[in-house]
Image (tube, rainbow, N blue to C red):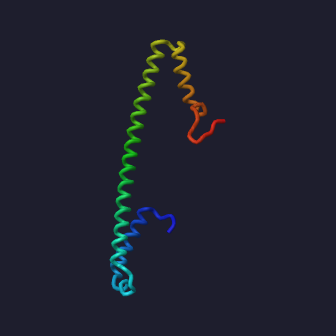
Amino acid sequence: MAALTEAQKRSFARQIIEIMKEGRAELTAEKFDVDGNIKEQEAQNQEAEKAEGTQTKAYADFTKASKISQEKTGIAYRGASDRADAIVGTLGRNHSISKRIRQIRDLMVIEAKRGKKRGETPA
């Protein structure tokens, strides 16, 4: 059963319970512990469903937190950009502080100069 989704696996686990219930007479005649196996499978299914719920909530929380982070970062960046423009406007574009701001912006545009990326080792 390779490459099954979690939903498919949980569905299979639920269907096996139904099969045990439907085949109770035949399984019991062969000394198969139907009630014990159903009870154990139901407990395992409940744990799986609970874990799925936890995972779903965590993903929703992560998605919400990511959206908030991106929004707040955008606000902070726009604020910094507006302030940089105001500084340059106040001091003039040839002032050393204005040149430093321009240098930072120029380096940000050139991807190779942005700094080390995750997983990269220094050259």
Q: Quadrant of the C terminus?
A: top right
Q: Residue furthest bottom?
A: 29
Most foreground residue, 87 or 116? 116
Query: Which residue is located at x 56 percent, y 25 percent?
Result: 106
> Which residue is at 35% across, 59% downward?
50
Instruction: Report whether 75 appears left or right of 102.
Output: left
Looking at the image, which is closer to me, 110 or 35?
35
Q: Position of residue 114 (x, y in %)?
A: 57, 32
Residue 90 image-quadrant placement? top left
Residue 57: where, in percent of width, then height?
A: 35, 51
The residue under the point 50% across, 64% down is 3
Vertical relation: 118 (above or below) 77: below
Q: How many marks?
A: 0
In this rendered view, identify the residue nearer to me: 70 or 56: 56
Q: Is residue 40 left or right of residue 87?
A: left
Residue at 36% x, 78% y: name it: 20
**Residue 86 image position (x, y, % from top left):** 44, 18
